[in-house]
Amino acid sequence: MRGALIAVVAVALGLPLAAQQNGGSLCVKANPGRAGVFVDGKYLGPAANFRIARTYAVAAGEHEVKLVDPRYEEVTKKVTIQAGKKTTISETLKALPVPKGPFGNLRTENPDKFAAVYVNEKFMGHVDEFSNSSQVLALPPGDYTVKIVPAAGQPVEQKVKIEAHKTIIVK
């Protein structure tokens, strides 16, 4: 059953069949759990949902894993994935100084709640983190390019002007 689940996850992530059959898995335990997991530059999803570490199907071999959260310093590690084995990494990201306002708000909507959200080509989180009036991305006033990249389907890109104390929605 577990092998079938890993294969389904691998297919969902778009891994080649050879990688699915000859791969292993990567378990990511990160603090904060909302940190985005990138393997060889490809966004796989948040490190944790509901406080449970996520496990990803990854091709065997050496890979670069990057943990990204805009409120923390990025962490980059090299890992070696062995076929049929689980590799676990645990990291605590170092907090950046808290920015000062005023801010405007960005909300995002997409059927893929874990679609990556980029602002000016910088990963900011996933759609579900900024999807309602109490969950927004606070940004200083200015012009931005917002891109939403779902696991399947076409990315959405939109230029927006953020104004202090106002909310913009990108769908």
Image (spheres, grey):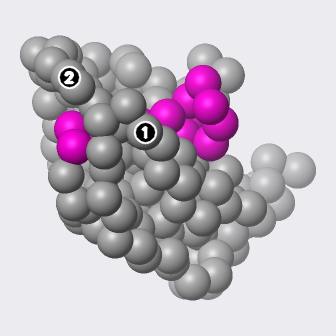
Residue 59, can we see it? no
Label 2 environment density (alpha carbons within 10 Å; few <14, some 14–19, many ≥20): few
> In this view, which residue lies farthest toward the right?
1
Say whether residue 73 is visible.
Answer: yes
Question: Horizontal placement of 1 versus 82: left or right?
Answer: right
- Is residue 1 found left or right of 56 in the rendered image? right
Mark 2 = which residue?
A: 101
Q: Position of residue 133 (x, y in %)?
A: 62, 31
Which residue is most to the left? 97
Q: Position of residue 86 (x, y in %)?
A: 51, 42
Q: Which residues are the magenta region? A: 128-141
The picture quadrant where one finds residue 137 is: top left
- Spatial CA span between label 1 and label 2: 13 Å
Please report the residue visible at 82 percent of the width from the left and 60 percent of the height from the top. 4
Q: Which mark is residue 42?
A: none
x and y, in percent, of residue 116 in the image: 47, 57
Nearer to me, 78 or 12:
12
Q: Quadrant of residue 92?
A: top left
User: Vertical placement of 44 versus 107: above or below?
Assistant: below
Neighbor class of circle 1 (other Cα within 10 Å; few <14, some 14-19, many 20+) is few
Q: Quadrant of the C terminus?
A: bottom right
Disc 1 marks which amino acid? Answer: Lys
What residue did someone put label 1 on?
166
Name the residue type under label 2.
Answer: Gly
Residue ID at (53%, 46%) = 107
Q: Position of residue 113 (x, y in %)?
A: 67, 51
Rendered residue at 15%/19% (across/down): 100
Q: Going from the N terminus, do you reach mark 1 or mark 2 first? A: 2
